[in-house]
């Protein structure tokens, strides 16, 4: 026989055990009462007893029950006594109220839509409410994965019935699915609250077919460049090649690709090699005299000055002196006027020698104030 079939405990602060309440168990039968188990259901209650495994006929024992709430609000539990009595098992209902802070999140998961790699999304906001009756103190907000946060929670305690907010951002570093978590540490129960994070990074990948080709000097080799979107990428990708040696050039058709959806966009890369040739560089002087003769700019001004002096001398002098002065002017003019071939140099272009070359194809697209780039390597064998 039990002295009570239920207990209601006084309100206690979370984490603080209250005073014990005692239940008496009496064996009213004519034989020994064998106790099989005395079990508590619920994390907020505990018991200690003097019953042991056997209660003699007409004897009694006591069970002390303690309420130690682990969270705010109404807390329930029970005690189950199993024995050889005819009415076994016997259940005692347990109820108590926990006082303290209580953390409640507006959501336990955030999902971000496709976001271009290296760029940051608009924020998504999580509201943290204190549904308890004491201040909520948040000690740490830890973010993992390609996510970040700003908040109003760490600056001060959150009063009972008040809220704070956490703004979450997604900055993918690679194309495809990304995951992370936000873990909040506080003085509520449980001491950690977790938010699951997910998002998709939008990017593109470059590939070439074939990755290796061959040709002879003076000929060309073609490759197919494929740009494949990942994670919902959509945009224009400009193509270029680098690492080219002298005598080798490349071109794309088309030079940029509009990429989107799930299918790859392609361009033809043509690599040109050089057998031999010459080139005449562009000079600053221009032929102004017959027969391809050139005159230097400084010589032109000198010639004009000497011509003026010559006119004056001719007017003032006669005979041998005028003739001598005219001869001097002619000699100086011959020195200043140069043949057309003397104003430029003939250079020979670099010949593509027989060898194996490794070059790089790159694709770039705008990513806010920056750019993102993908690369692929290819080989050219010149025979």
Image (spheres, rainbow, N blue to C red):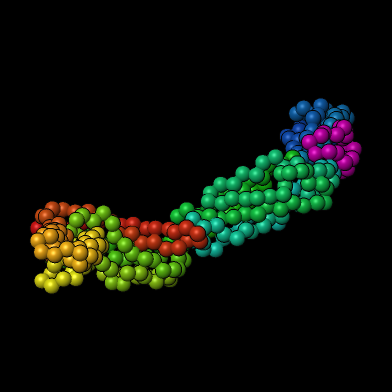
Front-most of residues 102 and 212: 212
State left or right for residue 41 relative to residue 176: right
Q: Quadrant of the C terminus?
A: bottom left
Front position in the image: 20 or 378: 378
> Which residue is found at the position 62% from the left and 58% from the top?
123
Q: Please give the name of the residue rendered at 79% of the width and 30% of the height, measured from the top-left corner.
A: 48
Q: Is residue 41 visible?
A: no
User: Do we see residue 53 in this rendering?
Assistant: yes
Q: What x and y, as percent, mark residue 316?
A: 20, 64
Chain part drawn in magenta? 1-23
Whole-percent x, y for residue 70 in the image: 76, 40
Relative to 174, 322 lies left or right: left
Q: Is most of the magenta stretch helix, strand or loop? A: loop
Look at 9% across and 61% down and name the residue there. 320
Q: Please, is residue 260 above or below residue 77 in the view?
A: below
Residue 25 image position (x, y, % from top left): 86, 34
- Tell me: 245 left or right of 123: left
Where does the image place residue 245, in percent across and percent down from the top left? 21, 55
Residue nearer the viewer, 3 or 289: 289
Q: What residue is rendered at 30% in x and 57% in y?
A: 376
Asked if the magenta segment contains residue 12, the reply would be yes
């Amino acid at each position: 026989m039990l002295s009570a079939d239920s207990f209601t405990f006084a309100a206690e602060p979370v984490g603080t055990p209250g005073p014990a309440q005692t239940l008496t168990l009496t064996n009213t039968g004519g034989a020994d009462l064998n106790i099989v188990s005395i079990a508590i259901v619920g994390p907020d209650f505990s018991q200690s007893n003097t019953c042991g495994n056997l209660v003699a006929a007409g004897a009694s024992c006591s069970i002390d029950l303690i309420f130690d709430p682990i969270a705010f609000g109404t807390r329930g539990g029970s005690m189950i006594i199993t024995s050889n009595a005819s009415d076994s098992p016997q259940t005692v209902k347990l109820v108590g109220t926990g006082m303290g802070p209580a953390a409640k999140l507006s959501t336990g998961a955030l999902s971000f839509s496709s976001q271009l790699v290296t760029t940051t999304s608009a924020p998504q906001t999580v509201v943290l409410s204190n549904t308890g009756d004491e201040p909520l103190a948040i000690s740490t907000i830890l973010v993992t994965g390609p996510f970040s946060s700003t908040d109003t929670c760490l600056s001060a305690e959150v009063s009972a019935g008040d809220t704070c907010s956490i703004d979450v951002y997604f900055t993918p570093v690679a194309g495809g699915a990304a995951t992370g978590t936000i873990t909040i540490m506080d003085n509520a129960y449980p001491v950690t609250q977790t938010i699951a994070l997910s998002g998709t990074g939008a990017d593109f990948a470059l590939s070439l077919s074939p990755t290796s080709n061959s040709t002879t000097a003076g000929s060309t080799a073609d490759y197919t460049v494929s740009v494949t979107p990942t994670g919902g990428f959509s945009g224009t990708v400009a193509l270029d090649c680098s690492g080219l040696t002298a005598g080798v050039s490349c071109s794309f058709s088309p030079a940029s690709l509009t990429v989107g959806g799930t299918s790859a966009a392609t361009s033809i890369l043509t690599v040109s090699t050089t057998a031999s040739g010459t080139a005449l560089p562009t000079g600053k002087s221009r032929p102004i005299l017959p027969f391809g003769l050139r005159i230097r700019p400084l010589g032109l001004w000198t010639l004009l000055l000497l011509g003026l002096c010559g006119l004056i001398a001719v007017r003032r002098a006669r005979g041998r002196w005028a003739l001598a002065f005219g001869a001097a002017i002619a000699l100086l003019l011959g020195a200043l006027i140069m043949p057309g071939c003397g104003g430029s140099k003939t250079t020979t272009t670099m010949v593509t020698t027989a060898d194996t070359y490794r070059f790089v194809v790159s694709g770039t697209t705008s990513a806010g104030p920056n750019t993102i780039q993908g690369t692929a390597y290819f080989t050219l064998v010149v025979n």
